[in-house]
Image (spheres, rainbow, N blue to C red):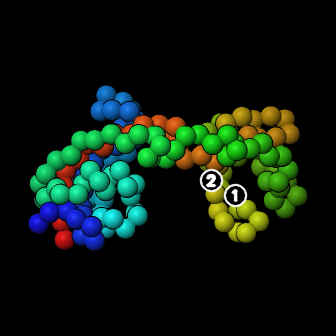
Amino acid sequence: MKAEKGKVITVHYKLYIDDPSGDLVEETTPEDPYEFTLGSGEQFDAFDKNIIGLKKGDTFSFAIDVNDAFGEIDEEAIVEVEKKIFKHEGKIDESIFEMYNLLPMLDEDGNEYSGVIIEIGEEHVTLDFNHPLAGENIWFDGEVIDVK
């Protein structure tokens, strides 16, 4: 059976930055493959387009351009915040302020976002709310495990 829109696809893959010689950033395992419904919006359109027509046992290897993946880095998603907003019971736990530490935050509507600390000052920290792969071209190598 061929992969087509609406089918449930199970794949095993490796995700690299740029190409297979780039940094490996994610890999599924045979015990925990990735399953998605083709064409449902769960994946990038560019990912779906490369899977359409494949069958169980087929392998794939393709690039996705930054603009079709996580997009360019959005400078407006990098913000400086005062450390005092992290007060809990009147105290600030300075141990949370470590470079590249991921801090969960809520906006005024209660939506949760995670920001990575990219700069630490005396009174402020700078957080990057971009996806970790923003600004990167990505590459997938993998195999179709099942098509339902």
Q: Amino acid at mark 1?
A: Met
Q: Residue furthest top?
A: 21
Q: Residue at x 26, y 50 (%)?
A: 50
Q: Residue at x 67, y 36 (%)?
A: 118
Q: Residue at x 64, y 57 (%)?
A: 113
Q: Residue at x 31, y 56 (%)?
A: 48
Q: Position of residue 67 (x, y in %)?
A: 47, 43
Which residue, given by chain and number where applicable, does mark 2 sit on? 114
Which residue, given by chain and number where applicable, does mark 1 sit on? 105
Q: Is residue 57 left or right of residue 29?
A: left
Assess whether mark 2 and mark 1 are in contact (beta carbons under 8 angstroms): yes
N-terminal of the pair, mark 1 or mark 2, is 1
Q: Is residue 81 visible?
A: yes
Q: Position of residue 7 (x, y in %)?
A: 24, 70
Q: Amino acid at mark 2?
A: Ser
Q: Is residue 144 left or right of residue 6?
A: left
User: To which quarter of the image does residue 2 belong?
Assistant: bottom left
Q: Position of residue 75 (x, y in %)?
A: 67, 40
Give 72 or 92, whichever is nearer the viewer.
Answer: 72
Q: Is residue 109 above or below residue 75?
A: below
User: To which quarter of the image does residue 17 belong?
Assistant: top left
